[in-house]
Image: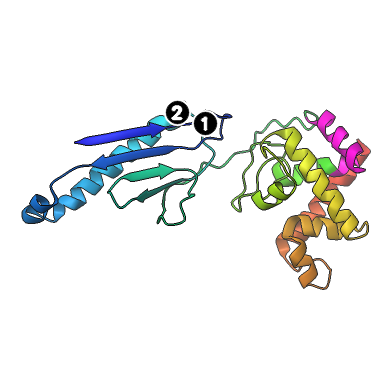
Amino acid sequence: MIISELEIPHGKPGNFLLVLKLSFKYDKVMIYKTNLNCFQLIGTLQTIFLVSALLLLMHAVPSYADIYKYEDADGVIHLTNVPSNPKAKYVMIMKEKRVLFSKVINIRQYDKIISQAAGKFNLDVALIKAVIKAESNFNHQAVSRAGAKGLMQLMPQTASTLKVDDVFHPGDNIEGGARYLRYLLNLYRGNLTLALAAYNAGEGAVAKYNYGVPPYRETQNYIRRVLAFYESYGKS
């Protein structure tokens, strides 16, 4: 007998908790007497059912997270995009489909939000736009492999510190990113190069190298790109 349960709490599109539970009831004594391979068969059937259910679900509900599986002490299989149980041994069974940038980019669609954030935190509009261009290419749903999200690619811990409620909301993300930029500029006494280095590699990396630009190729390329975009947007 197979019992299945699928729960999807209501929320904003793309931000949901998926829990899929399956329970297989069988006579363990009989299985041991028959053939141990039955366990492998049951495991295969479970996997087929779970993956099929997920594939069907993906067409109906937007998904923006990796999917993990674990089996509890009662033999119930749990599927979730939020591996929150510290005692569970999660196994990733589906990798998130990364966001692809659109070929057509409207760099002015967030101008009003950017202008408000620039005024609030005393930043140049061109600087905020340059960071957005380098970080996400103006894609508000962008997610990096490291876990940074949104237009200004805020890491979860940074977003939490900045009290950003929804990292995929353009207004929330831009305000959080602008607040962080202002903090870094104040921290490094107006040194934009160091502020950008810390934005990309972290404050710890800047401190590690005697408050200079870390010798990371990615960080050095990032600074050059942002400064080039900054100059370009400043002229427009």
Q: What stretch is highlighted in magenta?
A: 110-127
Q: Residues within 10 Å of mark 1 (few under 14, many from 20)?
A: few
- Quarter of the figure that contains the C terminus: top right
Residue at x-position 78% and y-position 59%: 198
The question of residue 210 being in magenta is answered with no
Residue picked out by circle 1: 62
Image-quadrant location for residue 24 = top left
Q: What secondary structure is the stretch in magenta mostly built from?
A: helix
Residue at x-position 44% and y-position 43%: 80
Percent of width and height locating residue 109: 77, 28
Q: Is residue 1 visible?
A: yes
Residue picked out by circle 2: 59
The reply to whether dot 2 and dot 1 touch (C-beta < 8 Å) is: no
Is 96 above or below relative to 188?
above
Q: Pick whichever, 82 or 232, lies toward us.
A: 82
Percent of width and height locating residue 52: 33, 35
Residue type at mark 1 is Pro
* Residue occupying the far top of the picture: 60
Marks 2/1: CA–CA distance: 7 Å
* Residue occupying the far left of the picture: 33
Q: Can residue 233 be seen in this view?
A: no
**Helix, strand or loop under label 2:** helix
Q: Residue 101 bears which disc, if any?
A: none
Viewed as shown, does residue 55 lie left or right of 118?
left
Percent of width and height locating residue 224: 81, 55
**Helix, strand or loop under label 1:** loop
- Quarter of the figure that contains the N terminus: top left
Q: Residues within 10 Å of mark 2 (few under 14, many from 20)?
A: few
Image-quadrant location for residue 76 = top left
Viewed as shown, does residue 24 lie left or right of 185?
left
Percent of width and height locating residue 51: 35, 39
Viewed as shown, does residue 199 lie left or right of 94?
right
